[in-house]
């Protein structure tokens, strides 16, 4: 049985005054409390334009409803940019391929270029049949990426670190955004089929913009799954594996999954925030946890390559 949301476990935090020094301290305390518990948070007053969200969601639905031939013109590249079709992602060795499609893009310079010096950082691919997608997607990316950086200053403050501790190397970040499309899941597919099967996120921080359909489920500390439905005007923020590793497990990366049995199609907008690939993820830099972790230092880029190679079928071909 799946439980309803428990707001004590997934708090709603108002970040309206995050740029005010005194309020930022309070927000940092709230984020610390939530992230040392379950690691999932609803945030409100985030200042991401609702009109932009709606425009991007409309573009996303138009893209995924298009023909396979049209979508194949921006097929996923080895740099993890473009369209990833059904069956392209698998979150565990024993799991079925996820019942979803994705369109993925990332950081780029104003002229559309980007340093081509890492396996997961490359030029974005944009469908010519949907010209509004590029503008809306990049506008959203820049806004949500800045929000992630702002939140990470609070995550640093919660550990009594300098505000820029987690974001000091972000000149050409590995951050990537995605439109994720889930068709309605027929009951005959069985209980072991998921839109996204049980997993934890790879990178530093995830910001999720749900639509009104819902389907996200979180695994509680008691091992029981519960729903995390959309709350109007909020985004969901969760700690991902690399931030948990960097903080020696103080910040928790929690398993979650998606089941879309709503009878409707579902579309989410996701930002996976990560800094520059050469950023060293070293728990030893944080004095309070130096002796409480056995994780070896690793660069952000190397860690993500390892995780991507396990999860995405196109990287095995």
Image (spheres, grey):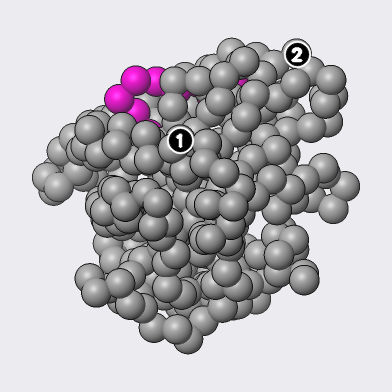
> Which residue is at 29% across, 36% downward?
55
Circle 2 residues within 10 Å: few <14, some 14–19, many ≥20: few
Between 302 and 96, the one lying in front of the other is: 96
Q: Mark 2 falls on what kind of element?
A: loop
| Tag 1 near tag 2, CB within 8 Å | no
Q: Nearer the viewer, residue 39 or 170?
A: 170
Depth check: give the residue in front, 131 or 5.
Answer: 131
- Position of residue 235 relative to residue 302, above or below, is above
Q: Which residues are magenta?
A: 227-237
Mark pair 1, 2: CA separation: 31 Å
Q: Upstream in the sequence, badge 1 or badge 2?
A: 2
Q: Dot 2 corresponds to which residue?
A: 1
Q: Quadrant of the N terminus?
A: top right
Q: Write down the residue under mark 1.
A: 61
State the residue at coordinates (50%, 20%): 213
Observer able to see residue 43: no
Measured as percent of width and height from the top left, residue 209 is found at: 41, 36
Q: Is residue 196 above or below residue 217?
A: below
């Amino acid at each position: 049985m799946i439980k309803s949301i428990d707001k004590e476990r997934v708090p709603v935090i108002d970040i309206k005054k995050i740029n005010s020094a005194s309020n930022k301290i309070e927000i940092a305390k709230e984020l610390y409390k939530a992230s040392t518990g379950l690691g999932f948070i609803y945030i409100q007053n985030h200042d991401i334009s609702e009109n932009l969200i709606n425009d991007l969601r409309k573009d996303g639905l138009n893209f995924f409803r298009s023909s396979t031939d049209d979508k194949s013109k921006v097929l996923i590249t080895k740099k993890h940019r473009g369209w990833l079709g059904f069956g392209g992602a698998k979150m565990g060795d024993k799991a079925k391929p996820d019942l979803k499609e994705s369109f993925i893009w990332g950081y780029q310079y104003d002229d559309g270029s980007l340093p081509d010096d890492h396996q997961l950082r490359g030029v974005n691919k944009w469908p010519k049949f949907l010209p509004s997608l590029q503008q809306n997607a990049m506008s959203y990316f820049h806004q949500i990426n800045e929000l992630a950086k702002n939140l990470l200053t609070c995550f640093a403050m919660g550990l009594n670190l300098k505000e820029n501790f987690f974001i000091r190397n972000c000149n050409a970040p590995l951050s990537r955004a995605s439109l994720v499309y889930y068709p309605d899941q027929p009951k005959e597919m069985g209980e072991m089929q998921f839109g996204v099967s049980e997993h934890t996120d790879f990178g530093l921080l995830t910001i999720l913009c749900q639509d009104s359909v819902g389907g996200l489920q979180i695994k509680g500390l008691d091992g029981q799954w519960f729903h995390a439905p959309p709350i109007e005007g909020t985004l969901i923020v969760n700690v991902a594996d690399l931030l948990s590793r960097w903080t020696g497990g103080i910040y928790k990366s929690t398993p979650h999954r998606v089941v879309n049995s709503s009878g409707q199609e579902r579309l989410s907008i996701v930002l996976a925030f990560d800094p520059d690939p050469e950023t060293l993820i070293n728990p030893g830099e944080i004095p309070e946890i130096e002796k409480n972790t056995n994780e070896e230092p690793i660069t952000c880029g190397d860690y993500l390559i390892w995780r991507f190679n396990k999860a995405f079928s196109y990287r095995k071909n």
